[in-house]
Amino acid sequence: MAQRRPDRVRGPGHDEFWAWCDKGELRLQRCASCGRIPWPIVQKCEYCGGSELVWEPMSGRAKIVSGCTFEYDYYKGMLPIPYETILVELEEGALFISNPVDLTWRDIEIDMPVKLTFLDCEDSAGAFKLPVFEKA
Ligand SMILES: [Zn+2]
């Protein structure tokens, strides 16, 4: 059963991101001018101002660089509390906030290798696939 989530941000860039996720691919924008990966989604490169951004597939390999347990419902209705949130560094360098799958704060260690998977979710716009991470 799909997990209910708050509404996603939609619009230019965001729609392409979610369309790739629905195909089971995590793709981020790589700047054709400077080669860096601005993230979160931009309309122009935050490093050089370049406007040619290419949707590049990420390997799905990452490591945990931080994490915390939300025990208070700061983001109303995000998930039933308590829930885990992790910051991972993708192999390609971008920092990505996500939820771990089958890992609690007891399991999470800094530099722990994790791999991408997708969770079936839904918001008011319908079903979508959310990029999350599990132990590699
Ligand atoms: Zn750039």
Image (cartoon, rainbow, N blue to C red):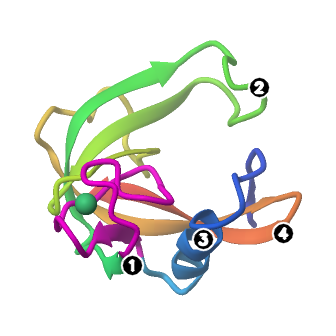
Determine which residue is flagged by label 4: 126
Task: Please state which of the two labelled residues, at mark 2 or mark 1, is closer to the viewer.
Answer: 1
The Cα–Cα distance between marks 4 and 3, rounded to whole angstroms, is 12 Å
Residue 53: x, y in percent?
Answer: 38, 73
Mark 3 element type: helix
Residue span colored magenta: 26-53
Residue 74: x, y in percent?
Answer: 66, 17
The Cα–Cα distance between marks 2 and 1, rounded to whole angstroms, is 31 Å
Q: Are marks 2 and 4 in contact (CB under 8 Å)?
A: no
Q: Nearer the viewer, residue 50 or 102?
A: 50
The residue under the point 54% across, 87% down is: 23
Residue 80: x, y in percent?
Answer: 70, 31
Q: Residue furthest bottom?
A: 23
Mark 1 element type: strand
Residue 57 occupies quadrant: bottom left
Residue 129 colored magenta? no
Q: Residues within 10 Å of mark 2 (few under 14, many from 20)?
A: few
Determine which residue is flagged by label 1: 55
Mark 2 element type: loop
Name the amino acid type tagged 4: Gly
Name the amino acid type tagged 1: Trp
| Quarter, ligand 1 | bottom left
The Cα–Cα distance between marks 3 and 1, rounded to whole angstroms, is 12 Å
Residue 49 colored magenta? yes
Determine which residue is flagged by label 3: 18
Instruction: Classify residue 23 as left or right of residue 106.
Output: right
